[in-house]
Image: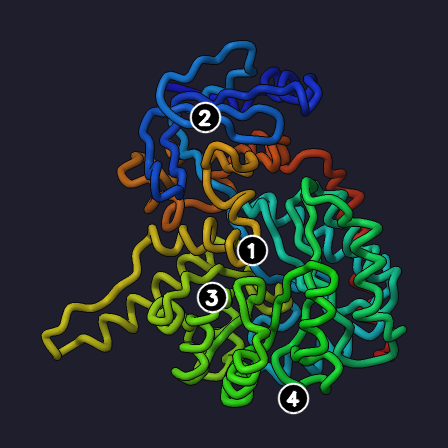
Amino acid sequence: MHVNDTTGAAVLEQLRRRPADDRRTLFTGATIVTMDPALGVLPDADLLVEGDTITAVGPNLDAGDAVVVDVAGTVLSPGFVDTHRHAWETQLRRIMPDVDDLGAYVMSTLAGYATVYRPEDMYTGTRLAALTAIDGGITTMLDFSHNSRTPEHSDAAVEALIDTGIRGVHASMGPHFGDWDEQWPGDLARLREQYFSTDDQLLTLRLATLATDEIAGPALAYGPGLARVAQDLGIKVSVDAVFGTASSEAILRWATDGILSPDVTLIHATGLTSEAWKAMGETGTTVALAPTSDAQIGLETAIPAVDEALSAGIRPGLSIDVEVALASDMFTQMRALHAIQRMRAVNAAHGTGREPRRITTHDVLDFATLQGARTNGLDAVTGSLTPGKKADLLVVQAEDLNNMPLNDPIGTVVLGSDARNISAVFIGGEVRKWNGQVLDVDLPALRREVHVSREYVLNTPAA
């Protein structure tokens, strides 16, 4: 029986001993799911990482002076990419698992709990979300940080991403309700200079905004003014709460105003008109679907808009959204979308003699990796195991009890696996999870911090 090296302390010590810029790591003997259309799936292959970058993928690569990690019996996959998560809420996980609708979420969380958050609560929630993401194989997370009440709140959220080592996207927005400094969006210039001054780092900055003024008023709604702010700063835009008639009308206005583009991501996109989808497709606008959020919270039609996106020529990314009511992991998003779309496709064709138009496990893994990276504006950096991209990758145990024997590697990742099967996670060539454990985390101390923050938030009257 083969036991691969992602459980060994000696190999981990070798990986961490050498300076990052002088490190060479060779993964050998894996089934490599590259998610690169030109490379496909490579059985019994190797992958070479030099520094933070993948430099070669293929059979029988020369090890040279590399640290050799024997990963036979595993699937090597790109890390998952989360395109939208409100990370600051994480100490309130599953506090409302049977939420009735969007209004119930908004009033309890955004009009209630959010108003009492301190910077340290922002840090705790964001750090917990990012560490959980890494544990579940998410190597890139867009944090839609819409509780930036002061500059210190924003700093805390960014520093939490830095401290976890995740490839993070800080999407900054002012809060919906309660007292705040009204420093947003002006503070984005300071954030960019202080934390995002180079293009070769793990973190990137985006402007976060809402589709319309229905929930929180015109100051937070996307339009020419906020588009100019993003353009002047050279950053991209994520637009949340995109659903229904009002959002459809807004999308057509944005298209007329010339502020839709591949640099703009529309989140949810449920219940939109065909005219809105046409405008999105023609402008190359990206889309972040939230399969469990749309279905469970009941956003407009409550049906994740994957068919509409594909019909418009848009391959979407996937997102977690709010952990106050939803699961934390990308496996759940892939499976939910896969099941919902295939159910609808078969149902629509039932009794007609037509062939159902079903998506595949390859499609949803593509959405969760390469298309998620494209949606976040990072497809040149991550999302596939392509030479020249950063080494953001997962080692998935294919011979574990719930996965063996390995018959279809993509099906195994999408339908068979969960966080316990991910023995190792690398982000930018740095090992972040090893032998099934996230590294450099004092779990008892983190647990105390999370509980203290939760008790403060729950027991402090809303501002």
The answer to whether the residues at label 4 and label 3 have Cβ atoms under 8 Å apart is no
Q: Quickly name the residue at label 1.
A: 82
The answer to whether the residues at label 2 and label 4 have Cβ atoms under 8 Å apart is no
Q: Quickly name the residue at label 4.
A: 214
Q: Quickly name the residue at label 2.
A: 56
- Alpha-carbon distance for marks 4 and 3? 26 Å
Secondary structure, mark 4, is loop
Which quadrant of the structure image shows residue 349?
bottom left
Secondary structure, mark 1, is strand
Is residue 323 shown left or right of residue 173?
left
Viewer-nearest of labels 2 and 4? 2
Identify which amino acid the numbered label 3 is placed on. Gly
Identify which amino acid the numbered label 2 is placed on. Ala
Q: Quadrant of the N terminus?
A: top left
Q: Residues within 10 Å of mark 4 (few under 14, many from 20)?
A: few
At 74% across and 69% down in the image, what residue appears?
229
Front residue of this view, candidates 201 and 296: 201
- Alpha-carbon distance for marks 1 and 2? 26 Å
Viewer-nearest of labels 3 and 2? 3
Precedes in sequence: disc 2 or disc 4:
2
Q: Position of residue 334 (x, y in %)?
A: 42, 57
- Alpha-carbon distance for marks 2 and 4? 50 Å
Precedes in sequence: disc 1 or disc 2:
2
Viewer-nearest of labels 1 and 2? 2
Q: Residues within 10 Å of mark 3 (few under 14, many from 20)?
A: some
Q: Residue furthest left?
A: 353
Is residue 94 at all visible to an observer of this figure?
no
Q: Position of residue 73 (x, y in %)?
A: 38, 27
Precedes in sequence: disc 3 or disc 1:
1
Q: Is residue 222 above or below residue 139?
A: below
- Alpha-carbon distance for marks 1 and 4? 26 Å
Is residue 249 shown left or right of residue 34?
right
